[in-house]
Amino acid sequence: MLISEKLRSHKVSYVISMFVFCIMLFPVFPAFAYEEPWDQIEARKSPIKCKRKVEYKRIKSINKNYSIPFKVILPREYESSTKRYGVVLMLCGASGARRGSGAEPLYFSVWCKLPRVMDNLSKQTLAKKDFEYAINEKELKMFNDWLAENPFEDFIAVDMWHPSSGRDAAFDKFITEELFAFLDQNYRTIPSKDFRAIDGACGGGAVALLTAFRNPECFAACGGMQTDLGTFPYALKYFEQNAQRIKAAKLKFNLNTNKADVCNSFEYYYKKDQMGNKIKVPSGELAKLVSMIEQVGLTAEVNVFSHCIHGYSAYRYPNGHQTMYFYSKLFKENALKNGMTNNSDESEKVNNISTIKNKENLENDEP
């Protein structure tokens, strides 16, 4: 009987030891990048769990003559503070645009988990699991160095459907005349171009750039994640046509892509000039755009990340985090430039900023 109990005890100890060994050998959390299949992502309909409020809105556009949906992603402390915030419009990619204006805008607020991305950045320290392990050690250190030097500050993000056409002047007017007015009236925004930006994914990134190129006086910055300039080759033409206005507005640019992205056109080749010197020449559309931006005396922040192919995974992993951090940093710089601080009553300063900007716009419109 005693021998039997001892054997049973040894067996139990052995099983427990092997179980602990397996857990150590094969961690519960995967240490490799995982990208959800698109069909699983697009099957998700309900808002993701996040630490911020996401509101569904819709405007019957006068310029477009139909109703346009969008979701307003609010800062975490929005309801418990009196602070005013900058606004970034996030235009959906082709997959979201094809669903039509009658569909609920899900692209960034649900599929791309943008509220979760902003929650991650608000922690001020990121781990590989925040990116579903789709990031290497060097990139992770880069993010945490950024946050340590210049902590993330929240703003209002607007998840937007768009009509997909990059030549839609009526959509430009919807944004500049209707949407911004609605946001300023219904939310605590800072009604100044210094606190407005537009960005997007894939085709949405191209439309965001085109909108900013045609309306540089309305935005502090613009950008795109995995921007599909191949489908919108006339984007460079619009930049060229409006280059002097863009330069005068001091528009800033944020562009990111991935090494394995099918839309990655940040490509160069080398050749020798007449003197035999080796020179770098842009060959891809994105590289050409960056060159054009630099030629007018402006700069573009460009990041090419190692992980993720084209699609939702990239937008909510390194690309999405870098994009939202860029606009946080920009709005902080502009607040400092305009003499605004988080601890002061900003309402008077906001009114002064608006008055100054309106005066500047009137002066610019004079012949």
Image (tube, rainbow, N blue to C red):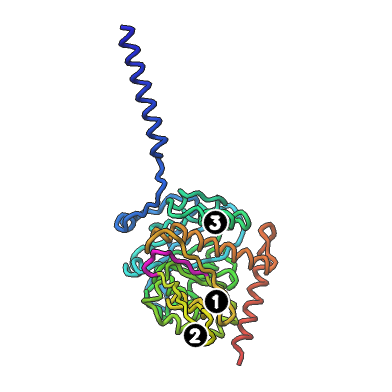
> Which disc, if any, is residue 318?
none
Neighbour class for label 3 at 10 Å: few (<14), some, many (≥20)? some
Distance between mark 1 and mark 3 Cα atoms: 29 Å
Coordinates of residue 291 in the picture (x, y in percent)? 51, 78
The magenta region covers 254-263
Using the image as rendered, state which of residue 122 and residue 125 is in the foreground. Answer: 125
Kindly identify the residue that appears in the image at 65 percent across and 68 percent down: 350
Binning the other alpha carbons within 10 Å of mark 1 as few (below 14), some (14 to 19) or many (20 upward) gives many
Amino acid carrying label 1: it is Cys
Image quadrant of residue 234? bottom left
Tell me: residue 52, above or below residue 355. Answer: above
Of labels 2 and 1, earlier in sequence is 1
Give the image quarter of residue 19. Answer: top left
Secondary structure of residue under mark 2:
helix
Q: Which mark is residue 240?
A: 2
| Disc nearer the start of the sequence (1/3) | 3
Magenta region includes residue 252: no
Classify mark 3: helix, strand or loop.
helix
| The magenta stretch spans residue 255 | yes
Q: On the rendered structure, is 354 left or right of 228?
A: right
Residue that label 3 marks: 143
Q: Is residue 181 visible?
A: no
Q: Which mark is residue 218?
A: 1
Quadrant of the rendered image containing residue 317 = bottom left
Q: Name which residue type carries label 3.
A: Phe
Q: Earlier in the sequence, mark 3 or mark 2?
A: 3
In the rendered structure, the answer to whether residue 88 lies left or right of residue 192 reads left
**Numbered disc total:** 3
Q: Position of residue 263 (x, y in %)?
A: 38, 70
Q: Position of residue 180 (x, y in %)?
A: 51, 71
Place of residue 243 in the rendered image (x, y in percent of width and height, measured from the top left): 53, 84
